[in-house]
Amino acid sequence: MSPLLWLWFVIRSTWVMTVLDNPLSWFLGFRGTKNRFDDIEGPFFLQGAPGVQVDEGQAVLSSTELFNKFDPFLLVLEVKDTNGQPVKNAIIDTWQADSSGTYYFFSWTLRGKMITDGKGRVELLTVRPGDYFSRAAHIHMRIQPANLKHNRMTTQTYLCTGNDPVHMSHDVANKFRPRPDGNMAICWATEDPKDGKSYFDLPKLPQEDVDMADAINRWNAKLKEQGLSKNIKSVGRHQIKLTAY
Ligand SMILES: [Fe+2]
């Protein structure tokens, strides 16, 4: 990345942290009032991430190296309008930390764009992000609808241990506002508990969830095709609603 681009990132992050994400801006109603799913951007967004879609409604955000190092995680995102209708062809620009809570700034690692399918869905294969500093694990998203019918939105999907939103309470972003429990994904472990302990204290995926089981099998086969011996360890669902423009 060029020095000019870096300068732009620094200026933009400063603007975001001092104005857009400032609790006072939210309190005064400049941000966070139109949609309860609206959330902070944080300082680590880089514009210009590449597309990471591999098929219709399917995207891979993590590198093979990170899949080897951490555990594959599958997030099924659904974008709807406030009437529950799917928002198709919306561009979702995501960025996240790896499982040790590290962001990457000198490559596009764990940053990329994808497009919702005809059902407003995207299956995102990535690694489970970890907590960092005083933040609870989350995946950032900027959602840009394909038409002017819906408002664009910046949001986050939180991933909480045991699907317990109390995990989000220690997050510095939630010290100044009501805890955004609606931004938590509901997750499941794919394997039985070991020594009485389940993966991140998550419940096992119910057998009747055949859609998710199909997705897991499909993605595990793709991981194997890539020469990886790892399987998906946890899955999550998150539904986001865009307000009408
Ligand atoms: Fe973050």
Image (cartoon, rainbow, N blue to C red):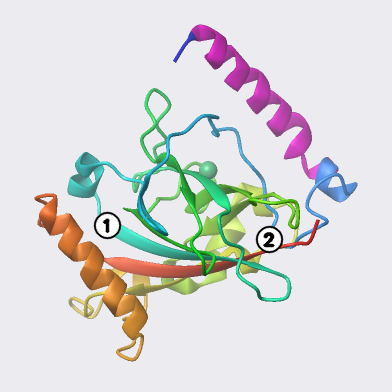
Q: Looking at the picture, does residue 94 appear above or below residue 209?
A: above
Q: Residue furthest right?
A: 28
State yes or no: residue 114 in magenta. no
Q: Which residue is mark 1?
A: 72
Residue type at numbered disc 1: Pro
Mark 1 burial class by Cα count in 10 Å: few <14, some 14-19, many 20+ = many
Total numbered labels placed on residues in the image: 2
Of 192 and 153, which appears nearest the observer?
153
> Which region is colored magenta?
3-24
How far, Cα to Cα, is label 2 from label 1? 26 Å
Q: Is residue 85 left or right of residue 93?
A: right
Residue placed at 60% from the left, 63% from the top?
Answer: 183
Front position in the image: 62 or 200: 62
Residue 244, horizontal then vertical, whole percent:
78, 61
As drawn, is 82 to the left or to the right of 101?
right
Residue placed under numbered mark 2 in the picture: 37
Quadrant location of the N terminus?
top left
The residue under the point 18% across, 56% down is: 223
Q: Looking at the picture, does residue 148 appear above or below residue 164?
A: above
The secondary element bearing badge 1 is classed as: strand
Quadrant assignment for the C terminus = bottom right
Task: State the image coordinates of residue 240 (x, y, percent, origin top left).
Answer: 61, 64
Near-viewer residue (224 or 27): 224
As drawn, 9 above or below 28: above
Pointers 2 and 1 in contact (C-beta within 8 Å) = no
Main SS, magenta residues: helix
Callout 2 amino acid: Phe
Q: Secondary structure at mark 2?
A: loop
Return the mark for residue 55.
Answer: none
Ligand 1 has an atom within 8 Å of the beta carbon of the residue at disc 1: no
Q: Is residue 182 visible?
A: yes
The answer to whether residue 231 of the structure is visible from this angle is no
